[in-house]
Amino acid sequence: MPDNKRILITGNNGYIGSVMAPWLQGQGFDVVGLDTGYFAPCTLVPDHTDVPTIHQDLRDVTASELAGFDAVIHLAALSNDPIGNLNEAWTREINSQGTIHLARLAKQAGVPRFIFSSSCIMYGTSEAAVVDETAPLAPRTEYARSKVEAEMALRALADERFSPTFCRNGTVYGLSPRMRFDTVLNDFMGNAFTTGRIVIQSDGTPWRPVVHVQDVARAFQAVVEAPLETVHNEAFNIGADQLNHQIRDLGQIAAAAVPGCELASVPHPGADQRTYKADFAKFKRTFPAFSFRWTATDGAKELYAAFRKIGLTHGMFTDKRFTRLSWLRHLLDSGSIDETLKWTDLKANNSREGAHVSTGQEAERSGNPIDA
Ligand SMILES: NC(=O)c1ccc[n+]([C@@H]2O[C@H](COP(=O)([O-])OP(=O)(O)OC[C@H]3O[C@@H](n4cnc5c(N)ncnc54)[C@H](O)[C@@H]3O)[C@@H](O)[C@H]2O)c1
């Protein structure tokens, strides 16, 4: 039985949380989730997990709800760049102010560890060949800024009673019950499988680190179990050197996983050319026994097998349930959530109704989605 045994995971009904929460449960942790449930009905494959969950907006959490936990793993967020474009205030309010609120209360409630799901995207465009955790942060979007602001505020809370750790993930891929098709490799695979064609909307040269969702779950476990002095107030890029890829490599990997798939590149002016390679030496040094088990090639094969099994159609692939911005817009348009992104009384009917809609309504994406 692990020492730091009682864990609260926020965002456990999201893409990563739906994999991480049951994984940690299976490892012997006593896991409780906290999620407002925006994407609860958005399942691509059934979620058979049984994680007790506090159905709560993190902005309304109280200290008493946090008492007794050995660690908080904080995943809950508006989780990509385009949502920031919909309304910047929401991203700031939930991702930075919400995080700070949660962390202050966790500290007040005596929770010793706070693991923050951050992002390598905060490095922005980098002139440097590789960016380690000391590289200057150059957030270019509201989403990236919200991660920087949250990290800075959490650092200021660190003391002998409270240890925040910042896990800067690359873009995550792989199968989850609450699938996202708005991240790069998942999107390429969905296109490859349902249309037989991948179109890269840039020259394909930008670099991005990617990481499999199951490896993210294992890496966070390593952080939760680490001696406090090794992770106290530390940032880690989560991944491994072989997981830095150019976008065109990821296109080739996805195309190779799907028989007969074509790969095309249509560079256009204004394409997203932000580029960076992450340096993962610090994680490797701190966790020498840990290995990232998944390669992008294995992940592409896993998705191909899963898509065959469920018979993924183009309508399912482009359904709004699997693109975070489209689903939030649906919840807003149907009156299920209000202009502060809190649930209204219409929630029960509308979100359930939406959950069964598989109209193939085109998801809102511009170009290849590459950041999360
Ligand atoms: N998926 C990636 O590629 C990636 C990469 C780097 C970092 N991250 C970070 O990891 C975390 C999880 O990402 P994900 O891909 O699982 O995202 P997701 O959108 O699938 O899940 C986020 C979850 O948080 C919940 N949530 C959002 N706002 C909330 C609020 N106000 N109160 C309570 N719950 C709320 C949602 O309901 C959802 O279940 C996020 O912090 C994201 O920024 C993700």
Image (spheres, helix red, strand yellow):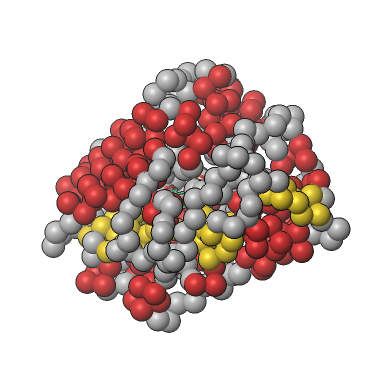
In this view, the residue in front, 52 or 39, is: 39
Total residue callouts:
0
Residue shown at the point (48%, 28%) measured from the top left: 86
In this view, the residue in front, 369 or 97, is: 369
In this view, the residue in front, 189 or 77, is: 189
Residue shown at the point (81%, 46%) measured from the top left: 195
Q: Residue furthest front?
A: 269
Q: Quadrant of the N terminus?
A: bottom left
Q: Is residue 187 left or right of residue 241?
A: right
Among the 4 quarters of the image, the one containing residue 116: bottom left
Residue shown at the point (63%, 48%) measured from the top left: 202
Among the 4 quarters of the image, the one containing residue 84: top left
Q: Is residue 7 above or below residue 41?
A: below
Q: Is residue 87 left or right of residue 228?
A: right
Where is residue 340 shown, x and y percent of the image? Answer: 39, 24
Where is residue 186 shown, x and y percent of the image? Answer: 64, 52
Q: Is residue 371 above or below residue 346?
A: below
Q: Residue furthest bottom?
A: 289
Where is residue 304 shown, x and y percent of the image? Answer: 75, 58
Where is residue 155 shown, x and y percent of the image? Answer: 21, 54
Viewer can see residue 10? no
Viewer can see residue 233? yes
Q: Is residue 276 left or right of residue 324?
A: left
Q: Is residue 28 left or right of residue 97?
A: right
Q: Residue furthest right?
A: 260
Residue shown at the point (39%, 38%) measured from the top left: 142
